[in-house]
Amino acid sequence: MMESKNYFDQVARDWDEMRMGFFSDDLRKKAIERAAVSKDETAIDAGAGSGFMTEALLKEELRVIAIDESLEMLEVLKSKFGEKITIIEGGAEHLPVEDNAVDHVFANMLLHHVENPGIAIREFYRVLKPSGKLIITDLDKHDREFLAVEQHDRWLGFERGKVIQWLEKAGFNEIEIDSADEKCCASSECSDAKAELSIFMAYGSKDQQQSRSDGPE
């Protein structure tokens, strides 16, 4: 099966139009409101794609670090936002960002493309400053297997309880997970199969004290 990275390289130039059919702009508004962002804070848009979250974060006057594995998606980001953002090639399981560096991490529709979501969530924790906030918006568990075949999803959504376990294991506090009151809609290109999937929003914050390191305490 084609890797997600290769798939997104192929669809990068059309992704803005494709994405509009999947979920609404209200999803990013809700995520940003939940994070209670402030002007001049720094946020990572993990799995930034063509900049759905990045665009909204810039409107809130945040400094944005957009990270994606797809070089083609990064080219789209450069063409749209130029020097307004920091663009980095990298994956969620090995974020090329130093420890305790950012105020927020947003991961919109990323985890179901990640091989090991638990590792990715630990990386989100690592790069957040003390009191930093994580917002994950992703799919509830479903049975629409055509998404794994046609859009190369690694996971058919997630049980919310499992996401909570990953957040707890990573060290997050104030964990919340609930419906985003949004649907992700998709249609198969190879059959008459359709999907109208519920989206969850997960929230976690990092301890105010510095995270524990591998060095001397």
Image (cartoon, helix red, strand yellow):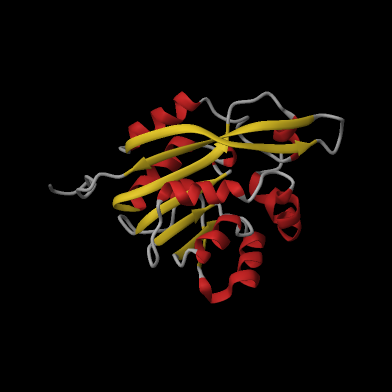
Q: Give the percent coordinates (x, y) of residue 107.
A: 51, 47
Query: Which residue, as the protein is rendered here, is positioned at the far bottom?
Result: 83
Q: Give the percent coordinates (x, y) of residue 38.
A: 38, 61
**Image quarter of residue 68:** bottom right
Tell me which residue sits at (75%, 38%) in the image.
186
Query: Which residue, as the protein is rendered here, is positioned at the far left?
Result: 217
Tell me which residue sits at (43%, 58%) in the image.
43
40 over 121 or under it: above or below: below
The reply, left or right, for residue 58 in relation to residue 134 is: right
Image quarter hosting the N terminus: top right
Query: Which residue, as the protein is rendered here, is positioned at the far right?
Result: 191
Tell me which residue sits at (71%, 57%) in the image.
16
Q: Give the percent coordinates (x, y) of residue 160.
A: 49, 27
23 over 154 or under it: above or below: below
The reply, left or right, for residue 160 in relation to residue 77 is: left
120 over 17 or under it: above or below: above
Picture mark count: 0
**Image quarter of residue 54:** bottom right
Q: Give the percent coordinates (x, y) of residue 29.
A: 54, 51
Tell me which residue sits at (55%, 60%) in the image.
56
Decide which of 155, 56 is in the foreground and name it.
56
Decide which of 49, 148 is in the foreground and name it.
49
